Image: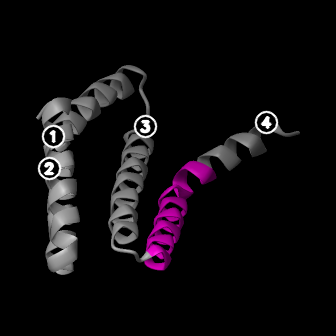
Amino acid sequence: MNIMQIVALGIVAAILAIVLKEYRPELAMQVSIAAGLIIFISMLSKFTQVLEVLKSYAVKAEVDILYFSIILKVIGIAYITEFGAQVCRDSGEGSIASKIEFAGKVLIMAIAVPIYAALFDIIIKIMP
């Protein structure tokens, strides 16, 4: 799916959601979520291509696969968190969106612990 198709889908879904919001608000939200999921899923193939390139460079640079996988997980958590928070905001649930963002930040901190540990080990080795 190219950008013109994505934008067209987004505009059609937005117009449909606006029209439905007057008569069937629950359907308007479903249209919005469905359009968002279609766009998100259609981008997964592009994301896979980017991951393959990054993985090849990580292998060339002899980066530990543990650190590379952590970075990919962090990126995934960030994208999924943002998507979920935006869906909540679209439905008028800003409070829940904030909680989702908080949970995403905590998960990122937890997953990145091996990177922090390696960084602290390096700092300790450098210090006299």
Q: Residue at x 40, y 57 (%)?
A: 82
Question: Which mark sits nearer the N-terminus, 1 or 3?
Answer: 1
Residue 84, by quadrant, is bottom left
Labelled disc at residue 12: 2
State the residue position of label 4.
126
Question: Which mark sits nearer the N-terminus, 3 or 2?
Answer: 2
State the residue position of label 3.
64
Q: Residue at x 21, y 75 (%)?
A: 22
Left or right placement of residue 100 versus residue 19 in this view: right
Q: CA distance from mark 3 to mark 4?
A: 21 Å
Question: Which mark sits nearer the N-terminus, 4 or 1?
Answer: 1
Residue 101 image position (x, y, % from top left): 48, 66
Question: Which mark sits nearer the N-terminus, 3 or 4?
Answer: 3
Q: Of the residues tagged 1 and 3, which is closer to the observer?
A: 1
The disc labelled 1 sits on which kind of residue?
Ala
The disc labelled 2 sits on which kind of residue?
Val
Q: Quadrant of the C terminus?
A: top right
